[in-house]
Image (spheres, grey):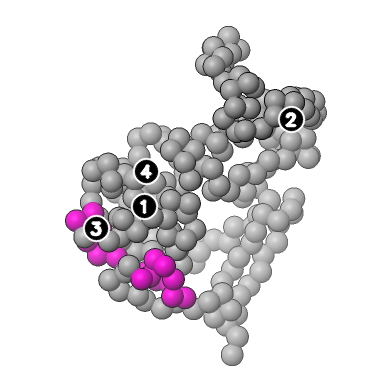
Amino acid sequence: FDRILKLLYAEFTLERASEEASIPLSRLLETADIIANCGGRLAAHNWRAASMGNEGGWQVTRCLFFLNVLTGSVGVKGGTSGNSWNKFVPTPFHKPPTIEAWNELHLPDEWPLAFFEMSFLLPHFLEEGRGEIDVYFTRAYNPLWINPDGFMWKKALTNEEKIKLHVALTPTWNETAWFADYVLPMGHAGERHDLMSQETHAGQWIATGTPIA
């Protein structure tokens, strides 16, 4: 394993990283030394950023978490935990049946271990000619704004051959709703009955949302 790993990573030197990122080599060496000697206390997090805005950027999150694995920083004090490990996940009172078909536009073969759909890649797959969508719903989701490649979404949502009907379920008017065939209003957080929790710290909590008159 170690031999193959070194072979695979041989071309990714600190010098190459310095040139790619325009960061002084000395800064990278200092950072690498800190991580190598962290004693299993590497707390890291990646949310969108380079992982969504660049071709091949999906590797960023994998590489970052790989450092947690190599340093023994997974699920230990001072390390990094899975997002649902320290969060109370309320069980819905009604669960819809599971799907009986595999949608390669949302769960492509390139990500066999993906637990959730790779929806942020959808316009790129449509551009490649992998398929088309009869009806597409966006729920409280504004991909034109939230994703770094928002113009790819504009291109897809305005192409009636790729996305034939777009329905936007949204509490506010936004960039994505502008390109919807139908806009269905939803309540804001203060107008919905919700059970929710967040991975704020190493502890579980739950909050209830009640509409405000």
Quarter of the figure with the N terminus: top right
**Could you say which disc has been placed on residue 152 in the image?**
1
The amino acid type, in three-letter code, at marker 2 is Arg
Residue 28 belongs to magenta span: no
Disc 3 and disc 2: Cα gap in Å?
A: 46 Å
Disc 4 and disc 1: Cα gap in Å?
A: 19 Å
Of pointers 3 and 2, the one earlier in the residue sequence: 2
The amino acid type, in three-letter code, at marker 1 is Met
Residue corresponding to mark 2:
27
Quarter of the figure with the C terminus: bottom right
Q: Are marks 3 and 2 in contact (CB under 8 Å)?
A: no
35 vs 17, left or right, is right
Image coords of residue 123 (percent x, y): 34, 50
Q: Secondary structure at mark 2?
A: helix
Disc 2 and disc 4: Cα gap in Å?
A: 38 Å
Q: Secondary structure at mark 1?
A: helix
Image coords of residue 128 (percent x, y): 27, 41
**Could you say which disc has been placed on residue 107 in the image?**
4
**Could you say which disc has been placed on residue 200 in the image?**
none
**Could you say which disc has been placed on residue 159 in the image?**
3
**Quadrant of residue 154 in the image?**
bottom left
Q: Secondary structure at mark 3?
A: loop
**Quadrant of residue 72 in the image?**
top right
Question: What segment is highlighted magenta in the picture?
Answer: 161-178
Disc 3 and disc 4: Cα gap in Å?
A: 22 Å
Q: Residues within 10 Å of mark 2 (few under 14, many from 20)?
A: few
Of pointers 4 and 1, the one earlier in the residue sequence: 4
Instruction: Tell me the chief SS of the magenta region.
Output: loop
